[in-house]
Image: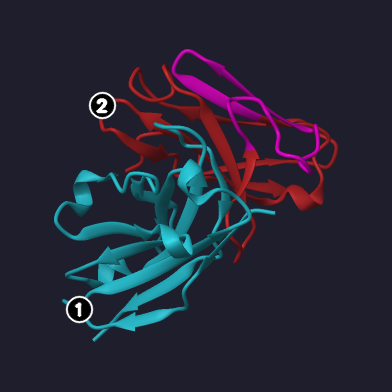
Chain colours: A red, B cyan
Amino acid sequence: QSLLTQPPSASGTPGQRVTISCSGSNSNVGPNTVNWYRQFPGTTPQPLIHSINLRPSGVPDRFSGSKSGTSASLAVTDLQSEDEAIYYCAAWDDDLKAVVFGGGTTLTVL
Amino acid sequence: QEHLVQSGAEVKRPGSSVRISCKASGYTFTAHFIHWVRQAPGQGLEWLGWINPNTGVTDHGQKFQGRVTLTRDTSITTAYLDLSRLTSDDTAVYFCVRAFGVRSSRFDPWGQGTLVTVSS
């Protein structure tokens, strides 16, 4: 069971806005930055959002991150078919002295 | 451009050990921690541990206590993961990743992954 809780699935139609939540605790999301990764089937996870809301070069500004308290969110605006993938959040946990991941959210474009 | 290139797929018997290498290029190897992450078939991501290539200091998850050894060879900018007493639960793709900062979950780039299959 993952220490960071994500919904197993999310969906939307093209052009819509979708958000994916990542719920943690006072030992991980609360005090530390949250990073998001995207994984297409059969490929390596790739960085999507780092340091809560910064995008690596090449990631469109349709993707944004935010954090409030012990929860973080990934928002995808103007949803496109190529956004179908699994999205993971991650954070350092001060109590475990370990990196913890969310269980992943499969995003489907209807 | 920064790259991490891992060794090839392995098939191991239960109870044996596996070593995976991770060759870094395109950046100063000793300036960034290397972490190891794995992904069992159809499952999510699981963190194993990290090594500071500059000092050789390591740490790993409690779950892997006594089974995981992380080392590095700075002369060839390569990090290694050794995992012993393998069981079928260790069947997974193992990734090495470069981290930014201490106590960080920001990983970029990722190695291409090494599939370890544990089967009798």
Q: What numbered label is drawn on residue A95?
A: 2
Rendered position, B90 above or below B2: below
Q: How many marks?
A: 2
User: Label 1 lies in what chain?
Assistant: B
Does the magenta segment cover residue A59?
yes
- Under circle 2, the secondary element is loop
- Give the residue furthest to the bottom: B120
* Image location of residue B13, percent across then percent down: 23, 83
> Which residue is found at the position 36% from the left and 21% from the top?
A25
Please state which of residues B45 and A19 is positioned toward the viewer in this rendering.
B45
Label 1 crowd bin: few (<14), some (14–19), many (20+), radius 10 Å: some
Q: Residue A14, percent across and down?
A: 83, 42
Question: Relative to A101, is B24 on the left or the right?
Answer: right
Q: Quadrant of residue A80?
A: top right
Amino acid type of disc 1?
A: Pro
Per the image, the residue denoted by label 1 is B14
Describe residue A6's horizontal placement relative to residue B68 as left or right.
right
The residue segment tinted magenta is: A49-74
In x, y percent, where is residue A85?
A: 65, 52
- Disc 1, SS: loop
Q: Residue furthest front?
A: B75
